[in-house]
Structure formats: structure tokens, C-alpha cells
Image (spheres, rainbow, N blue to C red):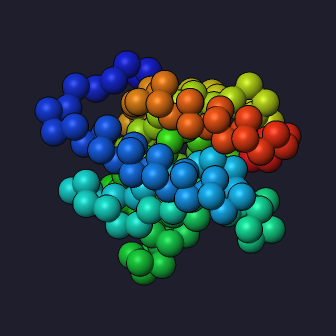
Amino acid sequence: MGSSHRPDGTGRDERLIRTAMAQAALAIASGNPPFGAVLTDQFDEIVVAGHNTQVSTSDPTAHAEINVLRAGGAIRGAPSLDGWKLFVNAEPCSMCLSAIVKSGIAELTFGAPHEPHLDPYLPAADVLARTKRPPRVTGGVLADECAAQIAAARNETGVAPVD
Ligand SMILES: [Zn+2]
């Protein structure tokens, strides 16, 4: 897994991570954990964007990534999202990483590294090291901005992290 940012003349990664951050802002505004995700097709066209809805839907698995993978499958009309790409404002947890692998996602791009309270504590690199067909991963896109948004949301609510 590369933590260095892949040079990209189009600014695609930054643009889509900013879209994920805008989704995270919607999550925050609706009282959910501060995470957003964007699913694109193989041509980088946005298929669906979404955010964490764990609190508003009382669903412990309603992470932003799971929500957009589910929506993507419905849109595609298939359980495989082979070749599509996912952009998230933070490093996905092990549940979402497993779902990403099972979906056939080709590329994963994320912003901030995961927070230390993650449980189970399984960094993306550890999960993907045990994966037969891992997606291409780029981490750390706009990492400081993403981490600042997450930290601000955590401080605002003052409640223990749920994610
Ligand atoms: Zn997750």
C-alpha cells in the first residue's frame, strides 16, 4: 500500500476526496460519525456518493463505504462492482475493506489515516496483505484537511467515537 500521493495531472484524487469530505459534512450535520465516500465507474465518473448513517438509521454497519457499495450494486444491477473505484475521506475499517475486496473495487483512495481507537485494530495494509486480489490503494490525499474535519467533528459532539 502506497502512502505517497500518486501524481495526477487532472487533480482527480483531490476533487473526489473533496466530494467525500462534503459527504462527511452531511454526516456530521445529521449527527452521524464524520465519514463520506464516493463511488465512481472505471472512467472516474461519479456513480453515487454517500455518508455514514449509523446513528440516523440505527445500523451498526452503515459506514459510508458500505452505504455506497450497496447503492452501487443496486444501480449496476449486480453484486460485483468490478473495475469501479472508491474514494473515502478516511482509511476504511476492516469491515469496509472486506466489503471493498468482495465488491471487486479496482482502486481505493482515501484521505486521513484511521484513528487509534479503531476496533478491531486492523490497518488497511494488514487486511490487504491477506487479500488475493487487493485494489490499488492510495492513502493520504488531503490527509491533513480530512483529519482536521474528523477531529473538529469529534470535539464538537464530545461523545465517544462510534464507528
Ligand atoms: Zn467501515
Q: Quadrant of residue 130?
A: top right
Is residue 4 found left or right of 70 in the rendered image?
Answer: left
Can you name the residue that lies furthest to the top here?
4
Q: Quadrant of residue 126?
A: top right
> Residue drawn at (46%, 37%), measured in percent from left and top?
110
Is residue 115 found left or right of 99 in the rendered image?
Answer: right
Can you name the residue that lies furthest to the right here?
160
Can you name the residue that lies furthest to the left here?
9
Residue 90 position in % (x across, y down): 55, 38
Residue 111 position in % (x across, y down): 47, 34
Q: Quadrant of residue 125?
A: top right
Residue 74 position in % (x across, y down): 48, 78
> Residue drawn at (79%, 30%), measured in percent from left and top?
117
> Residue drawn at (21%, 56%), measured in percent from left and top?
43
Residue 92 position in % (x across, y down): 59, 41
Asked whether the viewer can see residue 21, the reply is yes
Q: Is residue 7 above or below residue 54?
A: above
Q: Nearer the viewer, residue 56 or 108?
A: 56
Q: Nearer the viewer, residue 88 or 33?
A: 33
Q: Nearer the viewer, residue 29 or 116?
A: 29
Asked whether the viewer can see residue 62, the reply is no
> Residue drawn at (37%, 19%), measured in percent from left and top?
4
Q: Nearer the viewer, residue 66 or 146?
A: 146
- Give the total number of marks visible in the rendering: 0
